[in-house]
Amino acid sequence: MSMQKRMAAEFLGTFWLTFGGCGAAVLAAAFPSLGIGFTGVSLAFGLTVLTMAYAVGPISGGHFNPAVTLGLWAGGRITSGAILPYVVSQVAGAIVAALVLYMIASGKPGFEVGGFASNGYGPLSPGQYSMASAFTIEVVATCFFLIIIMGATAPGAPGGFAPIAIGLALTLIHLIAIPVTNTSVNPARSTGPALVAGGAYLGQLWLFWLAPIIGGLVGGALARALGAEPSSADKPRVAAAGAD
């Protein structure tokens, strides 16, 4: 598969993850009468990954997340030459999704940007959790996300079920981490909304790049050490996806 097609798949997958997950938070969760709430937003993120992993995963491996791409590199699943094209496509997809979501959300009378589903710590954390708490949960959650991804896509895993396991894992991660950071585990997903929200959210964006990347690298390396076999980057497995 050509790199151009892989990049297009990563752009579309990350667009859908950001648009669907953050859209559920910005549009639907803002109306308690709709009943989506905290659990619904968590499920929305998981469903974006599950659906796009089936749709475009066979093209690019379905990363939709820079931390996943780097984690899979650490796990021996992709070559170093694929990292930059994938990450650029993922960040671009998330930014475009956030801008489209802003265009839709701003059509409501009295609309205010607010946090716009951005991630944060301290005063910007949903539960006012500290920077240390935010950093720790993002590292740990992303680490286990990579372990799950690598295991679910290993040669001995049941065929065709990887997107389900990965989507449910992302749902679980959101159920745990939304009160702490609004859940990132995905630097691209964090970047799009932060650019729209601006201000302090942009100032805290560094953590939602650094912590998920550390977690992804550790998780990928651990999974490889445990025996998850590498696969050819020229024939990507349905491997992963994004996050909050």
Image: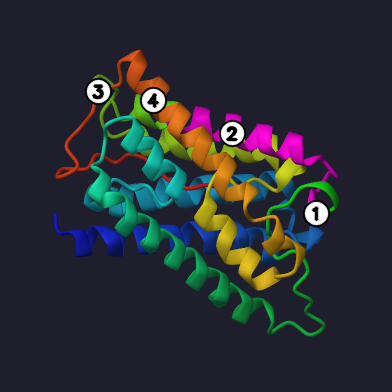
Instruction: Name the quarter where the N terminus is drawn.
Output: bottom left
Report the front residue among 64 and 175. Answer: 64
Amino acid carrying mark 3 in the image: Glu
Is residue 144 part of the magenta span, yes or no? yes
The label shown at residue 221 is 4
Residue under label 1: 124
Q: The disc labelled 2 sits on which kind of residue?
A: Val
Q: Is residue 59 above or below residue 202?
A: above
Name the element at disc 4: helix
Mark drawn on residue 229: 3
Sequence-wise, the earlier of marks 2 and 4 is: 2
Disc nearer the start of the sequence (4/1): 1
Residue 79: in magenta span = no
| Magenta span | 125-146
**In the rendered structure, which amino acid carries the disc numbered 4?**
Ala
Q: Is residue 40 above or below residue 231?
A: below
**Where is mark 2, residue-wise?**
139
